[in-house]
Image: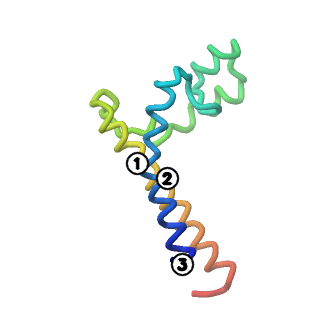
């Protein structure tokens, strides 16, 4: 098996396993993932929100807040899992496209 085929298989396995991010925190009674706090969660955790972060939080909204499509958050675990998988595929596609374009630009190949 070629290295690229092994890498592709590993990526597919990780995509399929991505909904574990939904299940494990609930099973382990954990809070949100480290560093994924919103302004409200940060206020609750440390008691204040840095001014710069508060300003920046109004500028950008994630395209898929909570890794789900709009209206899917109340539809159950299958819809939530599908949202995680869609997020994973989208992110991998964007990173792969940028990597390919940069690789071609830097190598001088058309």
SS at mark 3? Answer: loop
Neighbor class of circle 3 (other Cα within 10 Å; few <14, some 14-19, many 20+) is few
Q: Are marks 1 and 2 in contact (CB under 8 Å)?
A: no
Percent position (x, y) of residue 104?
A: 61, 80
On screen, residue 16 above or below 109:
above
On screen, residue 9 above or below 21:
below
SS at mark 1? Answer: helix
Q: Which of the two discs, 3 and 2, labels the residue nearer the N terminus?
A: 3
Q: For mark 2, what is the residue?
A: 14
**Looking at the image, which residue is at 69% across and 15% down?**
48
Q: For mark 3, what is the residue?
A: 2
Q: How many marks?
A: 3
Percent position (x, y) of residue 34?
A: 64, 31
Neighbor class of circle 1 (other Cα within 10 Å; few <14, some 14-19, many 20+) is many
| Residue 5 left/right relative to 76 | right
SS at mark 2? Answer: helix
């Amino acid at each position: 098996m070629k290295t690229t085929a092994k890498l592709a298989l590993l990526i597919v396995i990780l995509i399929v396993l991505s909904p574990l991010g939904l299940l494990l925190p609930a099973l382990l009674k954990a809070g949100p993932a480290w560093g994924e706090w919103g302004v409200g969660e940060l206020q609750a955790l440390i008691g204040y929100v840095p001014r710069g972060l508060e300003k920046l939080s109004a500028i950008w909204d994630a395209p898929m807040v909570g890794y789900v499509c709009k209206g899917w958050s109340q539809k159950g675990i299958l819809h939530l899992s599908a949202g995680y998988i869609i997020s994973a595929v989208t992110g991998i596609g964007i990173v792969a496209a940028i990597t390919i374009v940069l690789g071609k630009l830097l190598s001088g190949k058309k």
